[in-house]
Image: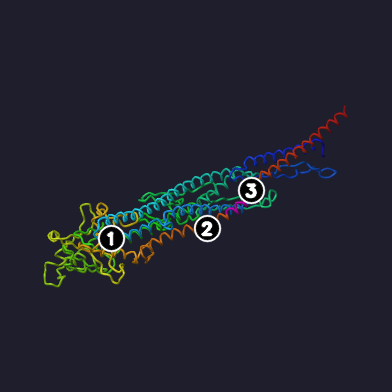
């Protein structure tokens, strides 16, 4: 039956419950600004009543649990949009930096330098024998090439920054995955009695889950979801098996984790590859599987797939920009050199060639087209004295005996080029052919004027025979091989004015021959800016002008940046809305906690009053006995 001691216990249970409420409220207030902390609530219920003749008499209160106010559905959305925002923020940041490398809309940049470069060729054409203008042309050419290489170096530098960030992020993923596995073990131990929830440990786990989503777009799969209406109408909790995965690859499985492997061994440019290591030790490439978070953005920017031959990425926004700039520079180099080879000289030496003496020229990696080009001989006064066409088709090789379908065979052939029955004034009488490896193993094609003919003032040039009025309709033989070059290099990384002209630009020539006033090369250079060429970028071919190719590159950067900005604005708005919903559910409200503190303080005082009353009643009883 109920007695005073039972009433005393009721008061004590009220004191205890109020004390736990004050402790929990204080805990909430203390952690209000702790990242990821979820507010907690005390769950109480009436204790089992005493059965008496008068009926069931209340037996006070008991604390059932201290639970988090947490909605898994809201948190899942928050984690997902956090991954999207991190991806978008990083992409926008890097693309905005990339766009600053192409300031052409402000009247400066490569396009402006190109216009000034062609203007100098126009001035040179008007004054072909003026040394001061030659110096000015040399300076403007170097300004253009330096700006091209500087821009490419900046893009490559940004690509390397992203690549290094990728390594940092993967290492952080592995560290967080290890922490997460340890937390899972701790949570299992803390909740093994199935009576209490490891609230603070679960908060820490949620923070790591969100961080892994931001880094790599990780998803969480957990067992049973149960509601907790006693705490909040939106509160629920997941229990049971636990996995954290990336596109189906489990990174954390309960209390164990599978670290990702990242390495750049064997890559000459230092580009990292990411692998998932199976239990049997097999490495599975992950670059195409990771599409979320900052790592996903890094791979999309840098390029995910690495070509095993070249060592360079085969995709990615930055890599496409690199490839576009290289295609633009290569087109400028080859088309210019092909035109400048019309300027007569006594020696032409090609670039280092990856070509055997008897392999097909057109089937090589050289940009040589079917057709023919002329070798032309000029005398000391600039008069043409001989000309011979050299044909190129799919079977043409570099070396061969006289009369064969090879460059050497066609040059050495005993042909009466001038139809004058004179056997001593034909191309084979003037020109020497050499295509043999040098002492260091490099293979270059070399045309030289016969020593006696050179002493007599003879020179030679190479001119394409065009299939149409377009410059691109020729063989591009001289341009592809770098014969008689104006530019050195083969890409945006190494384009520069030929060393001879850097050292002494007064040796530049505006004409086909040495005759005074000859400006035919300069006139072709002016026309070049209006000519269309084919630019090969990966599997795509662009048929456009040099200006057009550069515009395509700059426009691609601009469109990509604007798209990233627009997408980021949208995702940021979504993120803010979901974050507000998550905070409204789980974040500590100081005003609400102060209200609870007053409530528990009042409850504590009321429970204390019950104990005081019982004490007075007991004193009364003792007084009666006396």
| In magenta segment, residue 522 | no
Q: Quadrant of the C terminus?
A: top right
Cα distance between the residues tagged 2 and 3: 28 Å
Quarter assignment of residue 354: bottom left
Cα distance between the residues tagged 1 and 2: 49 Å
| Residue nearest the viewer, comparing 110 with 85 | 110
Q: Quadrant of the N terminus?
A: top right
- Decide: is 476 above or below 272: below
Image coordinates for residue 128, horizontal then vertical, percent: 25, 61
Which of marks 1 and 3 precedes in the sequence? 1
For mark 2, what is the residue?
567
Whether tag 2 and tag 3 are in contact, CB under 8 A, the answer is: no
Image coordinates for residue 307, horizontal then vertical, percent: 38, 56
| Residue nearest the viewer, comparing 333 with 107 | 107
Quarter assignment of residue 305: bottom left
Quarter assignment of residue 477: bottom left
Using the image, tell me which numbered label, if any, was put on residue 124.
Answer: 1
- Decide: is 234 above or below 404: above
Image coordinates for residue 92, horizontal then vertical, percent: 49, 54
Q: Describe residue 295's horizontal placement relative to residue 231 as left or right.
A: left
Using the image, tell me which numbered label, if any, was put on residue 253.
Answer: none
Colour treatment of the image: rainbow
Q: Secondary structure at mark 2?
A: helix
Using the image, tell me which numbered label, if any, was put on residue 586.
Answer: 3
Range of magenta residues: 575-582
Image coordinates for residue 73, horizontal then vertical, percent: 61, 54
Q: Main secondary structure of the magenta part?
A: helix
């Amino acid at each position: 039956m109920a007695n005073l001691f039972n009433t005393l216990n009721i008061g004590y249970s009220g004191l205890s419950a109020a004390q736990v409420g004050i402790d929990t409220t204080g805990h909430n207030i203390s952690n209000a600004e702790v990242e990821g902390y979820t507010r907690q609530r005390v769950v109480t219920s009436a204790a089992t009543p005493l059965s008496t003749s008068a009926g069931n008499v209340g037996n006070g209160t008991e604390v059932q649990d201290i639970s988090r106010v947490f909605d898994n559905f809201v948190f899942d959305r928050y984690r997902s949009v956090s991954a999207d925002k991190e991806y978008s923020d990083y992409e926008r940041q890097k693309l905005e930096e990339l766009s600053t490398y192409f300031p052409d809309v402000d009247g400066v940049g490569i396009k402006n330098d190109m216009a000034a470069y062609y203007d100098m060729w126009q001035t040179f054409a008007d004054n072909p024998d003026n040394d001061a203008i030659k110096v000015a042309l040399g300076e403007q050419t170097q300004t253009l090439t330096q700006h091209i290489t500087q821009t490419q170096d900046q893009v490559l530098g940004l690509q390397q920054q992203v690549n290094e960030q990728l390594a940092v992020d993967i290492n952080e993923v592995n560290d967080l995955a290890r922490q997460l596995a340890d937390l899972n073990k701790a949570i299992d131990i803390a909740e093994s009695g199935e009576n209490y929830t490891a609230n603070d440990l679960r908060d820490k786990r949620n923070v790591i889950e969100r961080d892994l989503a931001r880094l790599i777009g990780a998803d969480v799969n957990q067992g049973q979801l149960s509601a907790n209406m006693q705490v909040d109408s939106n509160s629920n909790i997941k229990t049971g098996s636990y996995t954290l995965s990336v596109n189906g690859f489990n990174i954390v499985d309960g209390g164990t984790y599978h670290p990702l492997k990242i390495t750049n061994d064997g890559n000459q440019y230092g580009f990292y590859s990411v692998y998932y290591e199976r239990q049997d030790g097999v490495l599975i490439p992950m670059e195409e599987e990771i599409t979320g978070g900052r790592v996903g953005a890094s791979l999309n920017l840098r390029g995910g797939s690495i070509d095993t031959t070249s060592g360079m990425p085969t995709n990615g926004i930055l890599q496409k920009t690199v490839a576009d700039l290289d295609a633009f520079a290569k087109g400028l180099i080859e088309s210019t050199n092909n035109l400048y080879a019309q300027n007569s000289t006594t020696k032409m030496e090609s670039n280092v060639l990856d070509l055997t003496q008897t392999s097909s020229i057109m089937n090589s990696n050289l940009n040589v087209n079917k057709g023919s080009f002329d070798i032309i001989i000029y005398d000391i006064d600039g008069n043409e004295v001989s000309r011979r066409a050299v044909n190129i088709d799919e079977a043409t090789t570099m070396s061969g005996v006289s009369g064969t379908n090879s460059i050497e065979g066609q040059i050495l052939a005993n042909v009466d080029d001038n139809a004058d029955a004179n056997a001593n004034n034909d191309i084979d009488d003037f020109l020497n052919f050499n295509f043999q490896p040098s002492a260091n193993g490099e293979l270059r094609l070399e045309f030289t004027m016969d020593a006696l003919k050179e002493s007599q003032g003879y020179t030679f040039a190479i001119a394409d025979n065009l299939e149409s009025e377009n410059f691109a309709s020729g063989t591009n033989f001289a341009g592809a091989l770098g014969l008689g070059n104006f530019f050195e290099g083969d890409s945006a990384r190494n384009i520069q004015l030929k060393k001879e002209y850097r050292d002494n630009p007064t040796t530049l020539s505006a004409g086909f021959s040495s005759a005074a006033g000859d400006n035919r090369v300069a006139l072709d250079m002016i026309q070049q800016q209006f000519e269309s060429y084919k630019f090969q970028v990966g599997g795509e071919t662009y048929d456009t002008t040099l200006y057009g190719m550069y515009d395509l590159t700059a426009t691609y950067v601009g469109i990509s940046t604007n798209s990233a900005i627009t997408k980021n604005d949208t995702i940021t708005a979504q993120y803010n809305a979901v974050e507000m919903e998550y905070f409204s559910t789980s974040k500590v409200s100081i005003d609400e906690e102060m209200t609870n503190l007053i409530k528990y303080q009042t409850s504590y005082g009321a429970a204390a009053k019950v104990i005081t009353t019982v004490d007075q009643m007991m004193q009364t009883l003792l007084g009666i006995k006396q």
